[in-house]
Image (cartoon, grey):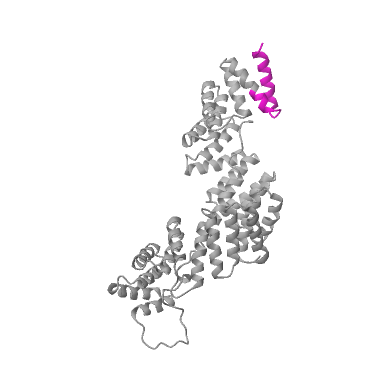
Amino acid sequence: MFLFLNPASLRRALFSLFSLAVLCSLFSVRCRAQSAPLPPGTSAPDSQQQQSSAPNPLEQAETAIQAQNYTAAAYQLDAYLSAHPNDARALFDRGYVADAQGQTDTAESWYRKAIAADPKQFEAHLALGLLLAGKGDAAGARDQLYAATQLEPNPPNPAAKAQAFRALASLLQTSDPTGARDALVEALKLTPETPADTLLAAQIAEAAGDDDIAEQEYRKVLQEQPDSPAASQATAGLAHLLIDEKRFTDAQPLVANALQRDPDDPALNAQMAAILNAEGKPAEAVAVLQKLHQLEPGSRSVTGMLADADFQAGDLDAADGLYVQLLAATPSDPDLLDSHGQILIRQQRYAEALAAFQKAAAARQGDVDAWSGIAFADSKLQRWSDELQALSMRSKFATDNASTLFLWATAFDNLHQNKSAVAYYRQFLAAAQGKFPDQEWQARHRLAALEK
């Protein structure tokens, strides 16, 4: 069974889970209307300020907004807009109210109308950018947030302008780390640095590949604000960085301490499982992942991680049960098919393994693991010509290694193509270097027979 590698590693699945946690925090800046800038031209109510005259209908609506009486505000704004359909301030107010009521599609429409009426209105660009970011429209959010950073709030509001820069920095942190860094710098020119800013700076540095700066900023959050909401994300970020650098000894106490504070945190449990697995403790990793699976039974990422860990721990039945469960939802997933096929190989169910690998190769033609599996299953089924075809396909996407060289040699040998068999046996012995003693003995034995 020396041909096959382990299935998709815990570290890759962990990265997916960590990436998901980062994405969930990425748009924490996506504020609902209650925390977005107040409508242009308004300010918070002042109990000591005396009104010299009765407010006009638009001011009445904005007073209702300040009081979070959105139903009344919507009624008043609809009446006002029926007579003033191109009033940019009122159009923004109406979007603000819809946003506060969770009516995101309606809010988007009103914000766009406000921008059409006044392209220089800061508040509408910012609100629309935040809304689009929350809806997953990264390109649209980027355009609107950038536009907001080029405009000024009315009345002047440095905190709102800084919010636009911070939102843009969060949005760009992976796609354009340099742009994200520049946006964060502009935000810090307007308002003081917060632990969330330091965390974002670390995430931007990590995305830019500057791991030293990222580690420095993560540690700064943990040292200066150990009890802040940003600290848990900083712990996860720093642990991910250390795990990625294979600094498991440094990562383990960090994650263990965090788990004492929050024993059910999914990301931390996933990281601890990755550390234990990397340290050669698959049984302990499985125990952690079983707990995580109980916490998040519907998570495909967690289920896949547990399946991989069960596989590496040698519990093939448990692993395959989970792979089959995942395949029921996505029957053409090549990674799952490869893992399922490898288990079938180890169970000596070669015909079933061949079918799984063939399906994986059909789903992803350049799947090197699938072509390797097909070749190996063909060899066990004594389908020598088909085995050579599979090896030929694999060679289009990856160079041969000792395992595939041995398969080439034995296939040619069984087809009585002695010259090719001798050549590949020699290549295999040169590559094996004592790592496959049983196959090397067989190669030498066959060479002695073929060269007589």
Residue 158 covered by magenta stretch: no
> In the rendered view, would you say 76 is above or below 440?
below
**Res 402 seen here:** yes
- Quadrant including the C terminus: top right
In the drawing, does residue 47 fall left or right of residue 19?
left
Question: Front-most of 291 and 266?
Answer: 266
User: Magenta part mainly helix, strand or loop?
Assistant: helix
Figure label count? 0
In the drawing, does residue 95 fall left or right of residue 168?
left
Q: Residue at x 58, y 57 (%)?
A: 203
Horizontal and vertical percent position of residue 343: 58, 35
> In the rendered view, would you say 204 is above or below 88?
above
Horizontal and vertical percent position of residue 63: 40, 79
- Quadrant including the N terminus: top right
Question: Front-most of 138 and 287?
Answer: 138
* Picture quadrant where residue 233 is located: bottom right
> In the rendered view, would you say 72 is above or below 202?
below
Horizontal and vertical percent position of residue 217: 64, 60
Q: Residue at x 52, y 57 (%)?
A: 179
* Picture quadrant where residue 115 is located: bottom left
Question: Front-most of 87 and 244?
Answer: 87
Horizontal and vertical percent position of residue 252: 69, 53
Q: Residue at x 55, y 24 (%)?
A: 381
**Res 287 seen here:** no
* Picture quadrant where residue 128 is located: bottom left
Task: Tell me which segment is drawn in magenta.
Answer: 427-452
Tell which residue pokes out farthest to the top in this image. Answer: 452
> In the rendered view, would you say 320 is above or below 408?
below
